[in-house]
Structure formats: structure tokens, C-alpha cells
Image: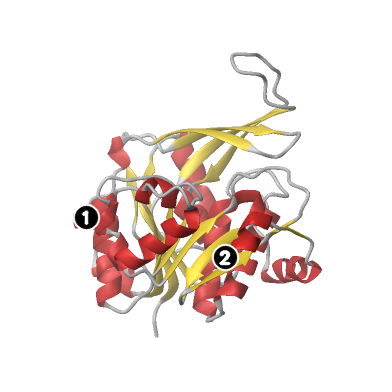
Amino acid sequence: MLEFDVVGIGLNATDTLIIVPHFPSYAGKGPFSQEILSPGGQVASAMVTCARLGLRTRYVGTIGDDDRGRVQIESLLGSGINLDFVQQRTGCPNQSAYIIIDQSTGERTVFWQRPDCLRLRPEEITEEMITSARLLHIDGHDTPAMEKAARIARENGIPVTVDVDTIYKGFERVLPYVDYLVASSEFPIQWTHQSDPLKALELIQEEYGIRCAAMTLGAHGALALYEGKFHYSPAFVVNCVDTTGAGDVFHGGFCYGVLAGWGIDQILDFSNAMGALNCTAIGARGGIATLDKAEKLMARADRRIMQEVQRRI
């Protein structure tokens, strides 16, 4: 029996959330109402979501030894995630982000920094990290390390999901080992230089042999190309307080659905519900829901449909 359901290798970050009544005009000024220190980061938050949903979860990554690093470690320890392969780098600050949250809409703007001393190197990736789990989830940072991890997974018949939001040097060496690509809406266009996002997904899937090529659409849901057909899942309507971490929680839900053996439509709906519910509270992990709560939202079926996507598929 495998020790874990899912292992995640990639980023964590400690966020400073600055809540403002509304964004000021460019070069303007405005008051803020709150400043909150909060743990986040793409893969780390996805793994916290998996653990919250009851999966046996391992996180692999690097963390600084400053105050922000300690906030992150304490949060992960409290989530029940296995941290045997987390490295705390001496004399290195943790990745940090300053996130401005517009109270009137819940939308956020992110400024982030990751020092090079946090870089995860390929020689630090071992088979034991990956083969102890049923699924591997990665991001696009530290590309040589991600390539090695994904290759080990493929060689051992372990499916790979990836969260990518921008172009990373050498990422073309990772994509041939990916089973489920779930990108931002900008990534397929940037990667292929094809202005039509649906055609861009088709090009990526065809070139790299990816089983499922998908993208998140923010407030409009998610779209996936799977088994020769597009599948569109509209977003669920909630009272949005903060969109920070919605995509990370979406990916955690996606990992859960893949491991549960669900069909792609159910996976997308569930992932959308998890992401939407996270938006109802402050912080990257503020509103991570239970399975029961997500299913109740899905049953309510109050959704925001992107008519252009609906029409084309």
C-alpha cells in the first residue's frame, strides 16, 4: 500500500494582505483598513486543500528561516501534511508576497519575491519522494527539479498534474511528462503565440501528448480539452471577499477529483466549487471547504456562465 495519496513539489509563500476599500487611481493614494500576515503559495496551498479533504498528503519544498518561514512551517505542521522532505534554508528569507485586496470586489493584486537561495535543485529530488504517492502535483518554478520529478512519476506510472501561470525557461522539458495541465487563461496564448485560447489548448495537447489540457477562467470558471472534446464548467456565484489562493485551492480540488476517479466534468465542477468557497474568506487558505460544503454549493447551481465559451464548444 502506498504511503500517500498525493505529493506536491513546489512553491510556498507567506503573504502580507493589505485590505483597501477600493483601489486608488494610478499613482494615487488611499487608506487601508487591515494588514494581515497569512500563509500561501501555489503547491503548498493545494496540498493543504488535499489534506483538508482527507487525502494522505506530502509536501516537498524549501522554506526560509526567517519569521515568514516560521509562519509557513507552523501552518503546514497544523494541517497534518507530511514534511519529511521540506528543507529549511539557513540564512535565507522565505518567499513573500504583498497582496492588495480591493474590499469592494474581492479582487487582488500581487507583488512577490522569491530569493534564489530557495531554489530546489534536481539532485535534491529522489525517487522516494514521488513513488510513495498515487499522484504528483507540481508548479512551473525550479524547472530542472520539476522535470526530474515529473520524469520519475511517468517512469513509475504516477499521474502528474501541473499548475502553471506564466512562461518558465525550460518548461518544454517538463510538459512531455504531464498528464493534467491546468494553466491560467494567459499561459496557452503566451506559450503558443496563438490568440485563440481554445486553439492554443489544442496545440499544447497535440504537441506534448497531454491527456487533459485545461485552463482556469477566473470568475468565469474553467475549460478543459479531454479525449477530443472541450468541457466547460461555469463558475459558482458566491459572496466574494478575497480571490487570493482561489486557483491554488482549485488545483487541490482537481487533485482530489483525479484520485477519486471522477469524470472530467465532475472534477471541474468540484474544483470550481472549492475555489469559489475559498473566495468567501480572507487569505490564500482562508476558506478551504469540506467535501460536504463543496457538494452543497454544487447542488445549488447558481453559476456565472461565459457565453462566448459556451457558444463555441
Q: Residue furthest left?
A: 123
Residue 174 in the figure: left or right of residue 20: left
Q: Position of residue 239 (x, y in %)?
A: 78, 49
The C terminus lies in quadrant: bottom right
From the image, tell me which residue sits under label 1.
122
Are the residues tagged 1 and 2 within 8 Å (C-beta)? no
- At x 50%, y 74%, the residue is 258
Q: Position of residue 118 (x, y in %)?
A: 32, 42
Of 215 and 313, nearer the camera is 313
Instruction: Using the image, determine if residue 283 lies above or below residue 288.
Output: above
Of 25 and 256, nearer the camera is 25
Q: Position of residue 147 (x, y in %)?
A: 26, 59
Residue 15 in the figure: left or right of residue 191: right
From the image, tell me which residue sits under label 2.
253
Number of numbered tags placed on the structure image: 2
| Amino acid at pointer 2 | Gly
- At x 71%, y 47%, the residue is 281
Q: Determine the secondary structure under disc 1.
A: helix
Residue 312 in the figure: left or right of residue 146: right
| Amino acid at pointer 1 | Pro
The N terminus lies in quadrant: bottom left
- At x 56%, y 79%, the residue is 263
Q: Quadrant of residue 222?
A: bottom right
Residue 77 appears in view:
no
In this view, the mark in front (1 or 2): 2
